[in-house]
Amino acid sequence: MKKSEVKDLDKASRVIHAGGHPDPETGAIMPPIYQTSTYVQSSPGVHKGYEYTRSHNPTRTRLEECLASLEEAKYALVTSSGLSAEMLVMHTLPAGSTILCGDDVYGGTYRLFTTVFNEIHNFIFINTTDLEEVESKIKEHRPSLLWIETPTNPLLKITDIMKVTSIAKKYKVKTLVDNTFMSPYFQNPLSLGADIVLHSMTKYINGHSDVVGGALMLNEKKVYDKLWTLQNSIGPSQSPFDSWLVLRGIKTLAIRMEAHQKNAMKIAKFLESHPMVEKVLYPGLKSHPQHRIAKIQMSGFGGMITFFLKGDIKKSKKFLSKIQIFSLAESLGGVESLIEHPAIMTHASIPKKTRETLGITDNLIRLSVGIENVDDLIRDLENTFKIIR
Ligand code: PLP
């Protein structure tokens, strides 16, 4: 299909066809893995757009085309990890910049900002779900960038992207949204006013827990050129094989996301009615504090659930070590169900006091609901509750 024809397709078709034209040389329906570091030139400086794989690679280009289409962006840049994408964004800002950042971001993002880039920039952590706080902190600090994660990891707090970006625009502040939890299938922050979208492709976009990768999508050529130059100069480009794996995984993004959310909704309701559960956080539940915003800005509620067990750390640890189908592991967004303890695992780099203030307590458990049979998953949870009772 021609690029112009793909543009008009539904997202469920674009995941398959965007960046997916047949190989012009052989007609191969799947893009080849251009496992090459360099490209032959016909005379010095004369080439076919590819000189060196750190700079460009045809397999990666296909993935970038697909991602740009899914986020409705003009440009996409694929990186070696979500964190390296974050690093590139930080390097686009002049030294001494102020960044207002959500207070409940992924632990690795928090570590990157507070232990690496804190030497170069100033970071102020705020509750981006509170519009008054956002406006007053922007007025007070005049930041260069507002960094939002929505829904957040692990508390699944939801920021009203349209309202927050319109406040930021009033003060000429750029906004970045980490869209990892929703994937481009359920949420498109650029169309809600954001300037840059970031993904850890390691999660839903790839979906098979076999690749680490990141991506940035945006519409402004000047910023894209800066990001690409930084990537080429610093070097965190994704390997052709990993880009190919993501291209393979992304083809089922639509059906995976639908299956994740269908299972998650059923599990969230099961947990909410369970006597050993104190509280459940899932954007699809009416009890979620920002359920109304979720319904407006997301086209689905995703596969992540956070719940609070009735009991202490000992009980949480026992639950996590006894559960069978859910694997005890960091990460999320794969076809298999995962379970983890943020205070000990993914968010251990956040100081205990800060974690407690945010509500990342010792009885908080995070589920990445996979696409297995949901009754098997519920039975697994039920059996584990019985064991720890
Ligand atoms: N953003 C979010 C929301 C994440 O959950 C993660 C990783 O868990 C990252 C960014 C970092 O991505 P990566 O692990 O691919 O470097």
Image (spheres, rainbow, N blue to C red):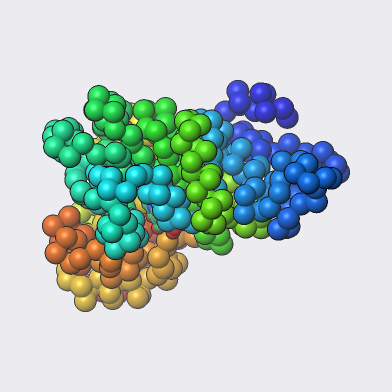
Vertical arrangement, residue 355 with respect to residue 77, above or below: below
Whole-percent x, y for residue 100 in the image: 24, 44
Q: Quadrant of residue 375?
A: bottom left
Residue occupying image coordinates x 37% and y 32%: 194
Can you say which quadrant of the picture contains the C terminus?
bottom left
Whole-percent x, y for residue 39 in the image: 76, 52
Vertical arrangement, residue 108 with respect to residue 129, above or below: below
Residue 319 visible to an observer of this rendering: yes
Relative depth, front residue between 8 and 119:
119
Can you tell me which quadrant of the image ligand 1 is in?
Answer: bottom left
Can you say which quadrant of the picture contains the N terminus?
top right
Q: Number of callouts in the render?
A: 0
Q: Residue furthest front?
A: 44
Residue occupying image coordinates x 83% and y 45%: 43
Q: Quadrant of residue 187?
A: top left
Residue occupying image coordinates x 28% and y 66%: 349
Whole-percent x, y for residue 161 in the image: 31, 33
Residue occupying image coordinates x 51% and y 31%: 221
Q: Is residue 118 left or right of residue 245?
A: left
Relative depth, front residue between 214 and 358:
214
Q: Is residue 353 left or right of residue 381?
A: left
Whole-percent x, y for residue 342 in the image: 29, 64
Q: Is residue 222 left or right of residue 349?
A: right
Relative depth, front residue between 277 and 247:
247
Residue 372 visible to an observer of this rendering: no
Relative depth, front residue between 76 and 313:
76
